[in-house]
Image (tube, rainbow, N blue to C red):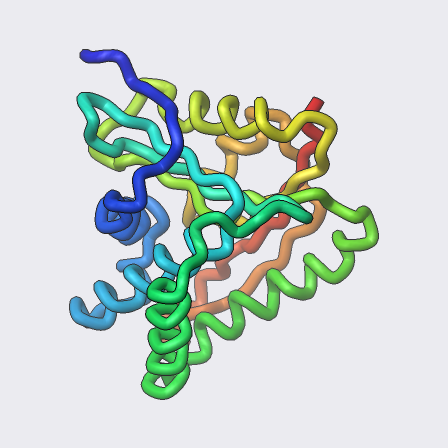
Amino acid sequence: MSEIQIKEFNTKDLEKVRQFAVTGMKFDKYVENQFALYFYSKIVAEMELKNSTIALGAYLDNELVGFVFARCNFQRLKYSNPKRNITVNFGNKLIDLFDNDDMAKTYDQANQTMLRQFMKNKPDGEITFFAVDPTIKHHGIGTRLLRALENKLHDQLIYVFTDSNCDYQFYLKKGFKIFDQINVTLDKDDQTPLTCFLLYKSVE
């Protein structure tokens, strides 16, 4: 296997970000219509990049195999531009107009409840979006991405939202701690609860 390189994310790779999110972050579990799934995942990818101050990509033979986006206080949103802002604003309005499902609202409310309490700790930043190509496993891609991000965040308190449908144990192995967790039920036909987590770490 060729050497994996960690470098600044190339915005031309947003389609790959969308694809990784659909499978790796289980977007397809909650959006069954394929067109709606494509549209929703595209808007989320654009939005998270727009709201980031740091974006790193893992590249194998110049192909994206993982990424991490983060937002740090008082840093410029370097990936925000008029075209992306218009795309995200328009996309969010369409999602609000046609999405009568309360799943996203329930999920967001749980996260905001935890965040209100955590903000008393005055965090310096947030990991906003993080995924690895689900077809490439056991090569330490996520570990290398997180390490590269933390090298830019010395002496900072960071947090991340995740849930029990994702590999939240990865963060715990890397020194993150659980600040809070809330169980929610997102599917009226499946009463199995999903656990939302707010995890945090003081980067040394």
Image quadrant holding the N terminus, namely top left
> Horizontal placement of 182 versus 66: left or right?
right
Q: Position of residue 138 (x, y in %)?
A: 31, 20
Q: Is residue 164 visible in the rendered structure shown here?
A: no
- Residue at 58% x, 27% y is 152
> Horizontal placement of 54 versus 158: left or right?
left
- Residue at 43% x, 41% y is 130
Q: Position of residue 95 (x, y in %)?
A: 36, 78
- Residue at 29% x, 18% y is 4
Image quadrant holding the C terminus, namely top right
Q: Position of residue 72 (x, y in %)?
A: 62, 44
Q: Position of residue 44 (x, y in %)?
A: 37, 60
Q: Is residue 33 above or below residue 20?
A: below
Q: Is residue 33 visible in the rendered structure shown here?
A: yes
Residue, far front: 82
> Horizontal placement of 175 versus 96: left or right?
right
Quarter occupied by residue 199: top right
- Residue at 50% x, 61% y is 193
How many marks do you count on the picture? Answer: 0
Quarter occupied by residue 172: top right
Q: Along the line of sight, which residue is nearer the eye, 50 or 101? A: 50
Q: Is residue 45 above or below residue 156?
A: below
